Image: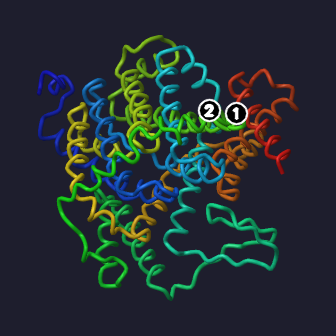
Amino acid sequence: MNDFFKLKENKTTLYTEIIAGITTFFTMAYIIFVNPAILSLNPGMPWFGIFAATILASAFGTIFMALFANAPFALAPGMGANAFFTFVICKQMGFSWQEALFIVTICGLFIILITVTELRKMIVKAIPGFLKDSISGGIGLFIAYIGFKNASFFKFLSESGNYCLLDNGGIIANSAIVPSLASFNNPHALLGLAGLIIMSLLVIKKVKGSIFIGIVATILIGVPMGIVDLSNVKLFDFHSLRSLKDVAFAAFSAEGVGSLFSDWNKIILTVVATLALLLSVTFDAIGTFIGTGRVSGIFDTEEEKSLANKKGISSKFEKALFSDGIAAAVSGLFGTSSVTTYVESAAGISAGGRTGLTSLVVAILFLLCLPFASLFSVVPPEATAPALIIVGVLMMSSVMKINWSNLEESIPAFLTISIMAFAFNISYGIAAGFIFHCIIKLAQGKIKEVRPILSGAALLFLINFIIIAIRG
C-alpha cells in the first residue's frame, strides 16, 4: 500500500488518507440524493436505475483517478451537468434521455481527445478567464433557482392569456408568468426553510460533511411532519442494481444513437449541446485541479504549464485530467450525466489527503451505499433543495474574479449569468457571452484577439438561434 501510493514520498500516512477519504465522501455524498432527483424528471428515466448508475459511475471514475493518477480527487456526476442534461438537452432541445446519454458519451470522448492532443491547449487558451468565471457563476445561479423551486419557496402568478399544452406536460403561454415568494403556511415550504437554515449554519461553522448532515437532518424533520414516509423502507434492497439495466448502455439503443442520427435536423443541435457540455465539464475539472492542487502542493507550477505546452500524458496533472476524461466518457454508458472531478475533494485535501488512497476510500464508501436504494428513494425534494442552493452560493464565488468596471468583460459576463437564470437555459447563457464577446471585439477592431475556436463556437450558437427563429 505504501509503495503503490507512495505515502512516504507524499508525506502522508494510511490513517491520514483514510480520514481524508471519509471527509471527502461526506462532503459530496449529497449527489446520491440529488442526481436521481434531477435526472428522474425526464419521463421514463427510472429513479432506481439512476441511483445505481450514479454510484457505479462515481466509484469507477474515482478508482481510475486513484490507480492511474494517484491523486486525491473524487468524481461523481457534476452539479450543473445534470441540470444541463435534464433542463436543456432533454426539455428545451427536445432530445430523449437516451439520446442525451449518447451526447454525454460523445462529450467524454472529446474530453479524452483534447487531453492527449494539441486541441486541449487551444481550448484552454481560447476562453477568456472572465467568461469561464461567468459560466461557473451562471450555473451556480441556475442551480440555486432549481433549489428554490424544489423547496417550494416560489409561487407563480399568471396573467390571463392563451395557453398551449405540450406533450411533455409543459405549457406555453403568451401571458406573463411572474415568480413571487410563497406563503410559508404549508409543511413543504417550512421543511425546505428548516433545511436551508440548518445547512447554512453547518456550512458557516465549517462542519465537515455539512451538506450531507443537513440533508439527513431535514429528512428526519420531515418524518413527524408527514412528508417523509419510512413505513415501506427496506434495508439491503438491491432493486437499484436490477433497475440498472434500464439505463446502462441505453445510449446505444434504438431510442439513443439509433434515433439521434435518423433525424438530420438534430445534427446541429447535437453539436451545440456537445460543445456546451464539453466547455462546462472541461473547465470545471481544470479549475478544480488548479485551485486545490496549487494550494496543497499536489500539482506544482511546472505541471500546470505542461497542460498547455506539452503533448502526451506525463505529469500527475495530465494523468488526473485524463482520468477525468475517462470517467466522463464512461458515465454515459452507465446511464448518468457527465461525471467530473468534484471541488468538494478540497475537503479531503485540507484533511491531509495527498494520494490516490484518499480517492480509493471514497470509491469504497460509494459502493457501500448500493444496498440502501429504498432508504434514499423516500428523500423529498425539500431535503435536497437546500443543497442545491448552497452549492449555487459556492459556485457564485467565481464572479468575484470578474473585472466589473471593465465593460468589455462585464457586459458578456453579465449576459452569460443573467440569461442562464432568467431564460432558464445554460447553453443560451454561454451563447450570449460568446456572441457578445465577439461582437464587442469586432466593433473595437480587436477581433484577432478572439481565438478561432471561440468565434467558431459563437457562430454555431448564432446558427442555432437562426434555425429556432425560422422554425417559429
Callout 1: helix, strand or loop?
helix
- Regarding residue 393, the answer to whether it shows in the image is no
Q: Of 97 and 57, which appears nearest the observer? A: 97
Q: Is residue 470 left or right of residue 33?
A: right
Please give the residue where the numbered disc 2 appears in the rendered image: 261
Q: Residues within 10 Å of mark 2 (few under 14, many from 20)?
A: few
Please give the residue where the numbered disc 1 appears in the rendered image: 264
Q: Residue furthest top?
A: 311
Relative vertical location of residue 384 with respect to residue 160 in this rendering, above or below: above
Q: Of 410 and 60, which appears nearest the observer? A: 60
- Regarding residue 42, the answer to whether it shows in the image is yes
| Rendering quarter of residue 403 | top right
Callout 2: helix, strand or loop?
loop
Q: Is residue 309 left or right of residue 138?
A: left
Question: Residue 314's x, y, as percent?
Answer: 37, 13
**Amino acid under label 2?**
Phe
Question: Residue 156's x, y, as percent?
Answer: 66, 76
